[in-house]
């Protein structure tokens, strides 16, 4: 059952190789399964978490750490090093510009579990020891895939909280995907205005992809840059979401509702103050001015204030303030 689920989750044309130092190949799934190393997650989503353990007693690492049994363990017969794989009950999208909360949650869980296992934090997470290959000693555990909430039970709250406060320069594993998303989408919220013209989407997509490529600068200790396929999928998702939701009409509507004569008169009476503070530019729009249309759009789609806050990396109180300002 577990082995069939692993095969079912593989990309149709995964990366594969017999020798990582000689580079990666892209082959049809049936051909790729003949190689010693294989890509285990498709670019759009994460179906499995894999941890790289470089110590002789790697097979017992999950037991020593008090973690649930992995779905498979592929052990190097020579040195005892292993890859430990956990399957997820529900795959998590890593290229959805509208919903980043599940990916952030998964990235935090991955980071904490890796620490508890003593796993290699620089593991790129792209290819794994092919558990179906005879070169490895593979142990399959016939258990149901795990939910994120269940895996989170093995992650101390303090460790998850510490991960959320980390610097973006400390991103590893799936945290790299989150970092690219956060950096590029914040830029995209305002940059899209320069591309509002007929047939402008293709140029906008190219601009977003270029921004993603510029952000994809991770050192080897972080797992290295994300593969081009993931960057391309991420850029496409951000470009589509912003092109669909941040349009000239939605921005014009925002301006109409926030720049009525009455509101402008109040602003003038405050002497150019924005949010109670004097603007250094004599009334220059604040970050709130660029985020408010996005907050309103997400709220209209039914997201809670907490979800909006997590997606935009602002406080829930700020979301409430933006919505209250819109009603005034």
Image: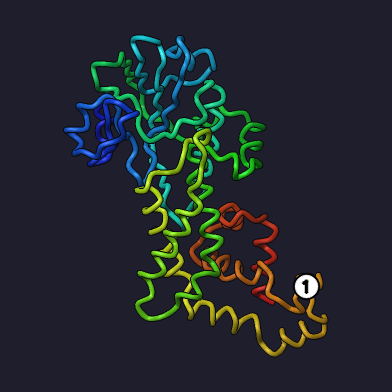
Above/below status of 18 relative to 205:
above
Q: Nearer the viewer, residue 14 or 220?
A: 220
Which quarter of the rendering shows the N terminus?
Answer: top left
Q: Nearer the viewer, residue 234 or 148?
A: 234
Q: Position of residue 172 (x, y in %)?
A: 52, 37
Q: Is residue 277 visible?
A: yes
Q: Position of residue 35 (x, y in %)?
A: 23, 27
Element class at badge 1? loop
Question: Which residue shows up at 27% across the image and 30% down it?
Answer: 17
State the count of labels.
1
Which quarter of the rendering shows the C terminus?
Answer: bottom right
Above/below status of 98 relative to 44:
below
Question: Which residue shows up at 56% across the image and 25% down it?
Answer: 115
Q: Position of residue 9 (x, y in %)?
A: 29, 36
Q: Which residue is mark 1?
A: 280
Mark 1 neighbour class, 10 Å CA radius: few under 14, some 14 to 19, many 20 or more:
few
Question: Which residue shows up at 25% across the image and 22% down it?
Answer: 132
């Amino acid at each position: 059952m577990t082995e069939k689920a692993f095969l079912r989750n593989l990309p149709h044309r995964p990366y594969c190789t017999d020798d990582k130092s000689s580079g990666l190949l892209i082959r049809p799934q049936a051909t790729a399964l003949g190689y010693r190393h294989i890509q285990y997650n498709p670019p759009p989503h994460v179906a499995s978490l894999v941890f790289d353990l470089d110590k002789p007693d790697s097979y017992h690492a999950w037991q020593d750490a008090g973690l649930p049994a992995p779905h498979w363990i592929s052990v190097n017969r020579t040195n005892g090093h292993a890859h430990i794989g956990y399957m997820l009950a529900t795959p998590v999208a890593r290229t959805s510009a509208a919903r980043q909360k599940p990916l952030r949650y998964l990235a935090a869980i991955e980071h904490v579990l890796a620490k508890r296992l003593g796993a290699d934090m620089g593991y790129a997470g792209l290819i794994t020891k092919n558990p179906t290959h005879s070169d490895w000693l593979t142990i399959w555990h016939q258990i149901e895939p795990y939910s994120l909430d269940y895996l989170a039970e093995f992650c101390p709250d303090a460790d998850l909280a510490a991960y959320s406060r980390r610097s973006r320069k400390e991103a590893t594993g799936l945290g790299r995907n989150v970092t690219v998303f956060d950096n590029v989408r914040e830029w995209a919220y305002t940059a899209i205005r320069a591309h509002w013209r007929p047939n402008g989407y293709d140029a906008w997509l190219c601009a977003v992809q270029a921004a993603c490529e510029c952000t994809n600068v991770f050192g080897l200790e972080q797992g290295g840059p994300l593969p081009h396929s993931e960057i391309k999928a991420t850029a496409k998702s951000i470009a589509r979401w912003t092109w669909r939701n941040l349009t000239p009409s939605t921005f014009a509507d925002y301006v109409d509702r926030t720049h009525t004569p009455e509101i402008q008169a109040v602003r003038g009476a405050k002497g150019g103050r924005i949010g109670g503070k004097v603007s250094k530019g004599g009334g220059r729009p604040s970050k709130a001015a660029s985020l408010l249309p996005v907050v309103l759009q997400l709220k209209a789609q039914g997201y809670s204030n907490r979800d909006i806050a997590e997606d935009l990396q602002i406080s829930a109180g700020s979301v409430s303030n933006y919505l209250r300002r819109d009603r005034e």
